[in-house]
Amino acid sequence: ILNVEQSPQSLHVQEGDSTNFTCSFPSSNFYALHWYRWETAKSPEALFVMTLNGDEKKKGRISATLNTKEGYSYLYIKGSQPEDSATYLCAWAGNMLTFGGGTRLMVKP
Amino acid sequence: ETGVTQTPRHLVMGMTNKKSLKCEQHLGHNAMYWYKQSAKKPLELMFVYSLEERVENNSVPSRFSPECPNSSHLFLHLHTLQPEDSALYLCASSQVPGQGYSPLHFGNGTRLTVT
């Protein structure tokens, strides 16, 4: 069974805190790793597509790293804001795109 | 209008009904997808179409029947569904399918309730 696991499942932080979550995926047959942000009542929105071991991507206060040899990716949010509240999904592109269960982030003002 | 549009947003149907979900993309993409999200489960891939040809059918029951008449439109025809089919159905598109190098662009989804 090829599983994509995300941890934690949910996270409550205060405004201004920095936070990070983990995506674990099979290290074999790797093509790409995607991160998406899914706000309530909206559609999932792509943040990053990462393909190379050691890749680091950044978009504003959000950044991600990738380790394909050990099969994990971290997503970091610096100085969390209430508008960062969303579910963050990762997806592993092996034979087909397989999603993790997501990390639900709630940022309190 | 831009992006990926899904209709209807909400649908309630009985087990003997026949209904269809519609998806339209205005991004010039070559691939379209149907995903299902049930409560407390990850997104599950149902179907992939590339250049209007079905390239993936992820062991989906035959009561779900996809149709892709052209690269901009995708339908999911539903008949004799079961209550456990109640879920959020998301449509997505991407530049190219295959090894997942292109990000997916999602619609807002159809919330389906089967009574």
Image (cartoon, rainbow, N blue to C red):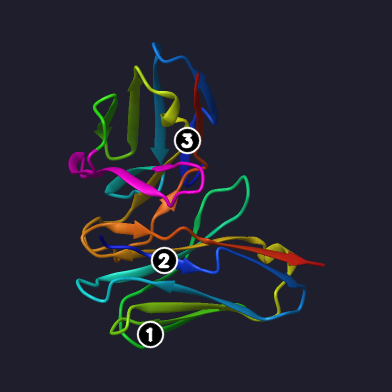
Location of residue A73 with respect to B52 vertically, above or below = below
Q: Residues within 10 Å of mark 3 (few under 14, many from 20)?
A: some
Q: Which residue is mark 1?
A: A55
Residue B43 among those drawn in magenta: yes
Q: Which kind of residue does numbered mark 1 sit on?
A: Asp
The spot of residue B73 in percent (x, y) is 34, 34
Residues rendered magenta in the picture: B36-59
Query: Looking at the image, which residue sits at the far bottom?
Result: A54
Q: Residues within 10 Å of mark 2 (few under 14, many from 20)?
A: many
**Residue at the spot x=29%, y=64% of the render?**
A93
Q: Nearer the viewer, mark 3 or mark 1?
A: 3
Q: Which residue is mark 2?
A: A5
Q: Which kind of residue does numbered mark 3 sit on?
A: Ala
Same chain under badges 3 and 2? The reply is no
Query: Looking at the image, which residue sits at the far right?
Result: A109
**Residue at the spot x=33%, y=39% of the render?**
B72
Q: Contact, CB < 8 Å: mark 3 with mark 1? A: no
